[in-house]
Image (cartoon, coloured by chain):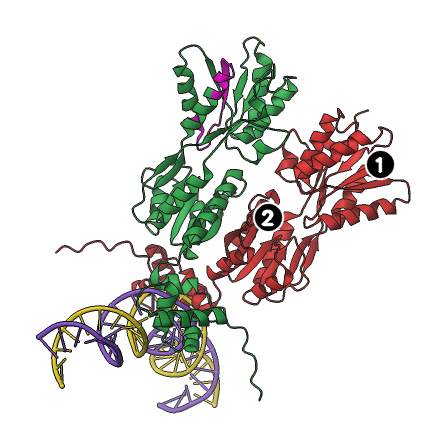
Chain colours: A red, B green, C purple, D yellow
Amino acid sequence: MAPSTPPARRPTLADVARESGVSVALASIVMRGTEGASEASRTKVKAAALELGYRPDSRARSLRSHHNRTVGVALRLGEPVHAELADALYAEAEARGYEIILGAIGGNRDERRVLNTLIDAGAEAIIGISPTLPAAQMAQVASQVPVVSLLRGYRQLPSVLTDEAAGIDELVAHLLHLGHRRLLHLDGGHAVAAAQRRTAFERAVARANGNVVGTVLGAGADESTTFDVLDAYLRETAADQRATAVLAFNDRAALGARRAIDLAGLRVPDQIALTGFDDSEFARLAHADLTSVRQDVAALASAAMAAATSPGAASSRHAPHLVVRGSSATSKH
Amino acid sequence: MAPSTPPARRPTLADVARESGVSVALASIVMRGTEGASEASRTKVKAAALELGYRPDSRARSLRSHHNRTVGVALRLGEPVHAELADALYAEAEARGYEIILGAIGGNRDERRVLNTLIDAGAEAIIGISPTLPAAQMAQVASQVPVVSLLRGYRQLPSVLTDEAAGIDELVAHLLHLGHRRLLHLDGGHAVAAAQRRTAFERAVARANGNVVGTVLGAGADESTTFDVLDAYLRETAADQRATAVLAFNDRAALGARRAIDLAGLRVPDQIALTGFDDSEFARLAHADLTSVRQDVAALASAAMAAATSPGAASSRHAPHLVVRGSSATSKH
DNA sequence: AGCAGATACTAGAACGTTCTAGAAGAGAAG
DNA sequence: CTTCTCTTCTAGAACGTTCTAGTATCTGCT
């Protein structure tokens, strides 16, 4: 009978070795780029690998060596900032010769399980973006592979954070510079960075020594509660007592705030200025044109990746920067 | 010397076997739930596994058997619809006893590589949400593992699609029912479903036998080009010739459209109705309150998962349904 | 020529699982 | 009491890689 085409089996290291006339062990050395092979064999083996379309099998690799250059990233799918961070992490991984696999936390999924799935799939380190697991459980996961927490601080874990206070400080300085003296902060409630942003706001106001009136209202991280809170405030407060600038917890909350402002018939930024936080998609939407604080996504990603891939990792904190847009621009006169 | 605590090694099947006094092979049978073990051994082994906190090693499992109950999902991180689908896929996977790992396409990443990474990490099947790879490359990937295309049709691949035409039909019928006779469709340009939605719109208008005037303007899937196109249209068109209802390509485009409408001083929905597509987060934002078409996320996810996990999979098409909100509500008089 | 010390290479075990093939034990039928 | 079948179990190879320990093969030096 005629020799039939074998059913597209994935080429293995043994195939490469045979093709280039060396041992499997030597082929392995070449593919890993380890020392111990002559230049001649290197070119020979690499050529064979290329010709066969060989891709090392990550599963076998990690099974044997616990090192397959793959890191797992757990993120929340809805969040624009997480998406940006993931993009930056991909770029960073690319530069370091790593691969990335993702797991989605949030929903009503078991976050622990998502992390385990990533580990089982061979991730040799985990980066969690705004994880919500209690410290003890995080530690348990970290006993299996290195874990880095991004955007949320854990005492026991290397944590890569944004300097929330610095962001709020910039924001407040900007508003003071524009001449605002009555500021309103809409607090993010239980959201991860809410407490830090609120205290930073309060301190910034305190530093102004009575020149500035700062109010904090408990709202929430989402659009609708923020709307409700600000709507009530604008109704109840006399025009001459009203804040002239509103600092929403984040961009999304700012969208709710914007609606309340529009409804009250106030013009932004002339009668009232509005700022967000995160500089997410929402801020850039043309009709929002929102002044916001941009996290240093590249630096965060780089630090997180570094912490994940090198053993003795330290925590770090990265300064964000102000992005001024129309919602707080100087009124033109 | 005192017996030191062993350094938290992950328990293996051999450990479970030893603990319960059976062979590794039998322990394997029990863990897989395969037949061939007595009830007595089953309970014995399961107890031991539980006690040791044993989790089967997915890498080893897939290396040996090419079956580790893990599917890889490739998605675009920015897209709200993708996030919803991912959530539904997770739920579906949970129900079927599968795990999910994610890969992010888009950015300027090589989509092929993302799929390969998922395969390397051990995914035994791949679901691509709105993939953009040319058919030939898709086929190449599909020669390694089963691949299902979600939201985009490939002739060679099992594809799970939304019935775009049905959605547009519902939308048009709704608007006609409200009394609108001049409709404007803002086309999505090169976006995946754009062509289907446009021709569906044209056919729906044609079916109305001259009772309805339908206009199509080439815009794009994003907010800003949609704004530009509609803004120009509203300026150039006399009020009595103007469309009374605008069908934006999707929710996001509708946001741009909304801004153009606001700018023109027209009130929604009294003077002009506006609809989106996808029923994403954008549509539900309170200030948008956008009538939209909701894809049947659960059905799509279920079909995709079924196609990914069972061999002879067929393509399917799922009807979406209309979600009426304020942007097209009957004017109250 | 003989030897030390590199350098280049390789056989074979190992990682944790599944799979194949067969052994041991228990009844049932002759 | 043998033989057969069925069930339950197990040894050992296999998956594709890396790692350990070692064997050849080259250098240059006395």
In the rendered structure, does residue B193 fall within the stretch colored magenta?
yes
Q: Is residue B227 above or below residue A16?
A: above
Most extreme residue toward the right is A210
What is the three-letter code of the residue carrying label 2? Leu
Q: In this view, does A237 lie above or below B30?
A: above
Q: Residue at x 39, y 16 (%)?
A: B207
* Mark identifier at residue B58: none
Q: Chain for mark 2?
A: A
CB atoms at circles 1 and 2 under 8 Å apart?
no
Kind of element beneath mark 2? helix
Q: Quadrant of the N terminus of chain B?
A: bottom right
In the rendered structure, does residue B6 fall within the stretch colored magenta?
no
Kind of element beneath mark 1? strand
Question: At which x and y percent is residue A281?
Answer: 61, 37
- Lower position in the chain sequence, tag 1 or tag 2: 2
Q: Residue at x 75, y 47 (%)?
A: A197
Q: Is residue B107 above or below residue B163?
A: below
Residue under label 2: A85
Q: What stretch is highlighted in magenta?
A: B174-197
Residue under label 1: A182
In the picture, measured across the screen, residue B269 lies left or right of residue A315, that is left
What is the three-letter code of the residue carrying label 1? Arg
Question: At which x and y percent is residue B34?
Answer: 33, 63
Q: Residues within 10 Å of mark 2 (few under 14, many from 20)?
A: many
In the picture, measured across the screen, residue D29 lies left or right of residue B21, that is right
Viewer-proximal residue among B237 and B85: B85
